[in-house]
Amino acid sequence: MLVPENVRIDSVSGAIAPETERYEKRLSELSQIFADREALGRMVVEGDPLVYKVLAYRKDGSDLWFGTTIIEAGDVGGEYFMTRGHFHKRHDMGEVYYTQSGKGVLVLQSRDGRVELLDMLPGTCSFIPPNWAHRSINVGPEPLVFVWVCDTEAGNDYGEILEKGMAKRVIVGGDGLRVVDRAD
Ligand code: NI
C-alpha cells in the first residue's frame, strides 16, 4: 500500500527531498533545438554548459508524478536556454506547471499548429491541456525553477518537436525578449 508523505521543494534551487530520479541536459545533448549551430559548437567546445535538469518524485503504483525543472540562464547565439519540448504520448493527459522562481515563457503548440505563449512568473500556475506540446524557456538572468505535475502514464513524445521544432522562437531582443517565426 502506498503511504502519504511530504516532499520538500526548495523554490530557489529546485531541490526536492526525497528525490527518486533525475537527469541533466548539457548543451551538446540539445544540438537539434537551437538555431545557431556555430554558436552552439563554440559553447560546447568551451565547456558544454548545463542547460537544464529535472528532479522528480515517483512512487511505483501511483498515478501521480511530480518534480522540478531548473533551467539555467543563458542563450545560444541569442536564443534563450530552453527544454526540448514534447507532446504527451497519451492524448488525453495534460500537465500543470507551477513557477517558483525566475522568469520564463511557456510555448505551447497544438497538434494543428496553433501557438500560445504564457508567462512563467513566480506564483503562476499554468494549465497545459492535452494535445499541446510544451517547451519552457528561461528569459531571465536567474535560474527558472518550476514544479510540474502529471500522470505517470502521460509519457513524453519528443520526436515531432525535435524533428520539426516549434513554430515560434524566443530570442534576446534590444530591451527584452522577441518572439520570431521559425526559419525553415
Ligand atoms: Ni509534459
Image (cartoon, grey):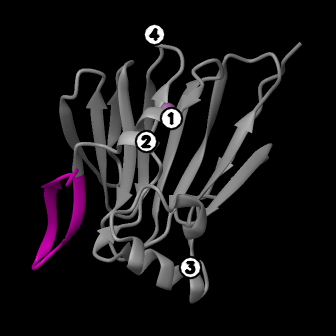
- Measuring from the top left, give residue 144's x and y in whole percent: 43, 62
Q: Earlier in the sequence, mark 1 or mark 4?
A: 4
What residue did someone put label 1 on? 159
Residue 65, given in percent of the width and then of the height, sits at: 65, 29
- The disc at residue 163 is 2
Residue at figure coordinates x 50%, y 24% from the top left: 88
Measured Cα–Cα span from mark 1 to mark 2: 6 Å
Disc 1 element = helix
The secondary element bearing badge 3 is classed as helix
What is the CA distance from the residue labelled 2 to the residue labelled 3? 21 Å
Predominant SS of the magenta segment: strand
Picture disc at residue 44: 3
Task: Give the residue at x 41% y 65%.
Answer: 81
Q: Is residue 14 magenta?
A: no
Report how far apart the C-alphas of labels 3 and 1 lie in the structure: 23 Å
Task: Please report contact status of discs 3 and 1: CB closer than 8 Å, yes or no.
Answer: no
- Does the closest atom of ligand 1 sit within 8 Å of the Cβ of label 4? no
Side (left or right) of 120 relative to 43: left
Task: State the residue in front, 14 or 179.
Answer: 179
Name of the residue lying farthest toward the left: 174
Q: What amino acid type is highlighted by mark number 3? A: Val
Name the element at disc 4: loop
Of the two numbered discs 4 and 2 in the rendering, the one whose residue sits closer to the viewer: 2
The answer, for residue 62, to whether it is visible in the render is yes
Q: Which residues are magenta?
A: 169-184
Asked if the residue under mark 4 is in contact with the one under mark 1, i.e. CB atoms within 8 Å, the reply is no
Looking at the image, residue 50 sits to the left or right of residue 132; the answer is: right
Q: Are marks 1 and 2 in contact (CB under 8 Å)?
A: yes
Using the image as rendered, state which of residue 5 and residue 30 is in the foreground: 30
Helix, strand or loop at mark 2: helix
In depth, the one of 129 and 77 nearer the eye is 77
